[in-house]
Amino acid sequence: MAKLDLKPGETMIGSGQMSLYQKQGLTKKPFQGSIFVTNQRACFKISMVPGLEMDLPVEEIKGFSVGKIALFTAVTIHSKSGETYPFTGFPAKKLQDWLRQAGVQEI
């Protein structure tokens, strides 16, 4: 699994392999990668792609919601600027706990 370079004073709360659903033309497609939640931010790195696809400081996160994509539980992170990041994968339940530990509220 990918690693995240932590900033000074930053501690890892949790990480796992998940899929981020992003718009590709008229449909949304899953991109596999790794989610990281720290005491300061939530990040997502797509496998085999340099850089972070999502790097949101906790204070920029409006909250998260839980729903379904097909048959899978989806956790969607909502930014204060209106962007949404829907994630699916086995750590979906853990992701909710990690976000709560980081101070992010469910909406």
Image (tube, grey):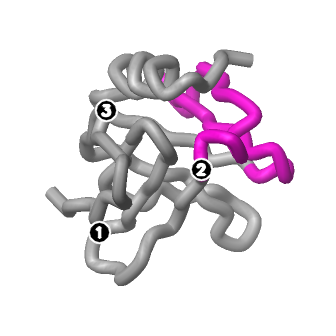
The secondary element bearing badge 2 is classed as strand
Residue 78 colored in magenta in the image:
yes
Badge 2, how many Cα within 10 Å: few under 14, some, many 20+?
some
| Residue 66 falls in image quadrant | top right
Residue at image mark 1: 47
- Reading the image, the residue beneath label 3 is 13
Helix, strand or loop at label 3? It is strand
Mark positioned earlier in the residue sequence (2 or 1): 1
Picture layout, residue 38 above or below residue 57: above
Q: Mark 2 — residue?
A: 57
Instruction: Please give left or right for residue 80 compared with residue 90 in the image.
Output: right
Residue 14 seen by the camera: yes
Q: Amino acid at mark 2?
A: Pro
x, y percentage for residue 15? Answer: 27, 41
Q: Position of residue 89 (x, y in %)?
A: 35, 35
| Residue drawn at point x = 74 percent, y = 45 percent | 79
Task: Name the residue type under label 3.
Answer: Ile
Residue 66 in magenta?
yes
